Image (tube, rainbow, N blue to C red):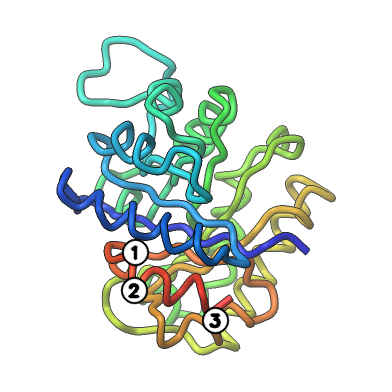
Amino acid sequence: MAAPFIVGNWKMHGLGADLGEAEALAKDLAARPASARVALCPPAPLIWRMAQVLKGSAVEVGGQSCSAKPAGAFTGDISAVMLADAGASLVILGHSERRTGHGETDAQVQAKALAALAAGLEPIVCIGETLDQRQAGDAVKVVRAQITGSVAPRMADKPFAVAYEPIWAIGTGLTPTLEQIEEIHHAVAVALKAVVGDAAARTPILYGGSVKPSNAAEILKTPGVGGALVGGASLKAADFLGIIRAV
């Protein structure tokens, strides 16, 4: 099996002074290599600088979103080609904060994923249910529909990942039970197989939602979990290492 994929999402946090945390992370992993694949996704203005700091290290650099367009009159947008040019090798797409705060649809997420692949980036497609959907018993139905709408069959021959993030657990300190996590990851795997066939078996399904050093080990050992998408705990090297070392 592939090594677990641990991705840190800095969201809208971090300035140049915080690049020392990325450097500290890389130095620790150089001294004691991890059993996981590791990446950091900082805000766009830090991507190039972080890529320079991490050059030659075991830590990959990614973006947090991209446009579905390669170029054009789209003020404020960033294309996948631009992310790659800045040193990114992957990009988070369809994060719940993009879906809920910016109205991104499954179709838009799929278009962005295809643009990312065309630019040589590895997309991490995010899916997940709200608290209302969970309480209504619709969690499985919701994530299956999101996979069907956000992942294209032609992505089968390209590397990509999926991240399941229960929206109600992000930044709240709440975490689903291990049984709930396993149930959704299984549902995602089934839905992926229906879209991309055998490629689903090599597509890591990450868990995201209040992952921290204290709960990382049990989450990462849950059947079907292929890694973690980490928010706040990825901002400090010591905390992020606690999750990486839990593998």
- For mark 2, what is the residue? 239
> Which residue is painted at 34% across and 41% down in the image?
53
- In which quadrant is the C terminus drawn? bottom right
* Secondary structure of the residue carrying numbered label 2: helix
- In which quadrant is the N terminus drawn? bottom right
Residue 82 sits above or below residue 162 on the image: above
- For mark 1, what is the residue? 234
**Amino acid type, mark 3:** Ile
**Could you give the CA–CA distance between mark 3 and mark 2, rounded to whole angstroms?**
16 Å
Q: Upstream in the sequence, badge 1 or badge 3?
A: 3
Residue 32 is drawn in which quadrant? bottom right
Q: Upstream in the sequence, badge 3 or badge 2?
A: 3
Q: Nearer the viewer, residue 33 or 130?
A: 33
User: Which circle marks residue 219 in the picture?
Assistant: 3
Q: Upstream in the sequence, badge 2 or badge 1?
A: 1
> Which residue is painted at 37% across and 26% down in the image?
86
Judge the density around disc 2: few (<14), some (14-19), many (≥20) Cα neighbours within 10 Å.
some
Residue furthest to the front: 31
Left or right: residue 5 compared with residue 229: right
**Amino acid type, mark 1:** Ser
Left or right: residue 171 compared with residue 227: left
**Could you give the CA–CA distance between mark 1 and mark 3, rounded to whole angstroms?**
16 Å
